[in-house]
Amino acid sequence: MLHISEISWKRLDTMEGIFKEGDKVKVKLLDIDQKTGKFKLSRKALIPKPEAQPKPAPKADGGEEA
């Protein structure tokens, strides 16, 4: 199973509207728990990480904020 935190780089509150039963989704195998044999899967590992927030543009008048 794919954990909600590994679906997208954005924070998802619910799975509603993300996938439907029967959808095929590509995932990456990150790890296998040696004790339980559980797979750690990630979809977001296959999606490019969003760039950092762009810096605000300088003011048009060239002035500085007070």
Image (cartoon, rainbow, N blue to C red):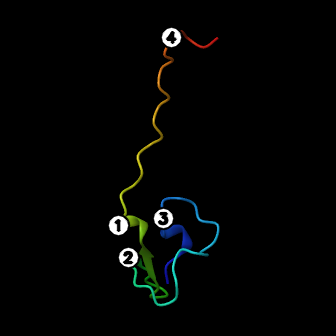
Query: What is the C-alpha distance between the residues marked 4 and 1?
Result: 43 Å
Determine crowd level at label 2: few under 14, some 14-19, many 20+ residues with C-alpha closer than 10 A. Answer: some
Q: Which mark is residue 61?
A: 4
The answer to the question of whether label 1 and label 2 lie on touching residues, with beta carbons closer than 8 A, is yes
In the rendered view, tell whether residue 54 sits above or below residue 42.
above
Q: Amino acid at mark 1?
A: Leu
Determine crowd level at label 4: few under 14, some 14-19, many 20+ residues with C-alpha closer than 10 A. Answer: few
Q: Amino acid at mark 2?
A: Val
The answer to the question of whether label 3 and label 2 lie on touching residues, with beta carbons closer than 8 A, is no
Q: Which residue is mark 3?
A: 8
Query: What is the C-alpha distance between the residues marked 3 and 4?
Result: 39 Å
Question: Considering depth in this image, is 55 or 6 the residue closer to the camera?
Answer: 55
Comes first in the chain, label 4 or label 1: 1
Q: Could you tell whether 49 is left or right of 62 in the image?
A: left
The spot of residue 65 in percent (x, y) is 60, 14
Question: Considering depth in this image, is 40 or 57 the residue closer to the camera?
Answer: 57
Query: What is the C-alpha distance between the residues marked 1 and 3?
Result: 10 Å
Comes first in the chain, label 1 or label 2: 2
Q: How many marks?
A: 4
The spot of residue 35 in percent (x, y) is 48, 85
Q: Amino acid at mark 3?
A: Ser
Q: Which residue is mark 2?
A: 27
Could you tell me which residue is drawn at 48 percent across and 16 percent down?
A: 60
